[in-house]
Image (cartoon, helix red, strand yellow):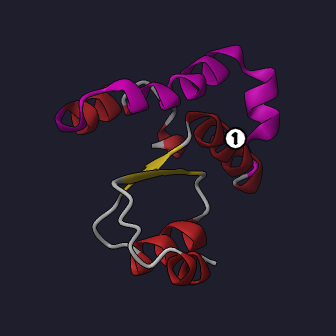
């Protein structure tokens, strides 16, 4: 799809694009426009976390354990941290998660 768009708009050099967390879309976009900054949608970040909870079998724990749910709901706040602070902020949050989630 991105290659078709590039054919239609050969002079286009987007500075940035907002995508969901579809890895295939991100990879294919970066292949066509490697110098464009790819940003991902906050809504889709939260949706991705929910999908991963289901994929690893934690949906029931999330639903029935309010403390766990509160901690998991804090994960998207990493999107608001300065890039240099993300590892420290993540580690601080990870230390409060149950061992099986670290």
Above or below, 31 against 18 in this view is: below
Residue at the location (61% across, 62% down)? 22
Point out the image quarter for the N terminus. Answer: bottom right
Displayed quadrant of residue 63: top right
Q: Residues within 10 Å of mark 1 (few under 14, many from 20)?
A: some
Q: Position of residue 25 (x, y in %)?
A: 58, 69
Q: Looking at the image, which residue sits at the far left? A: 84
Q: Is residue 31 left or right of residue 1?
A: left
Let me know if residue 74 is in the magenta part. yes
In the depicted view, which residue is nearer to us: 3 or 56? 3
Q: Which residue is mark 1?
A: 47
Which residue is found at the position 56% from the left and 35% from the top? 42
Q: Check if residue 16 falls in the magenta segment.
A: no
Mark 1 element type:
helix
Give x and y (percent) for residue 16. 38, 52
Q: Quadrant of the C terminus?
A: top left
Judging depth in this view, the residue of 59 and 27 nearest the camera is 27
Give the dominant element type of the magenta stretch: helix, strand or loop. Answer: helix
């Amino acid at each position: 799809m991105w290659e078709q768009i590039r054919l239609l708009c050969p002079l286009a050099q987007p500075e940035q694009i907002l995508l969901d967390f579809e890895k295939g879309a991100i990879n294919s976009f970066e292949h066509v426009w490697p110098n464009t900054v790819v940003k991902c949608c906050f809504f889709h970040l939260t949706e991705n976390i929910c999908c991963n909870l289901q994929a690893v079998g934690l949906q029931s724990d999330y639903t029935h354990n309010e403390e766990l749910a509160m901690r998991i709901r804090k994960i998207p706040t990493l999107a608001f941290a300065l890039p240099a602070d993300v590892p420290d902020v993540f580690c601080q949050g990870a230390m409060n998660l149950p061992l099986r989630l670290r």
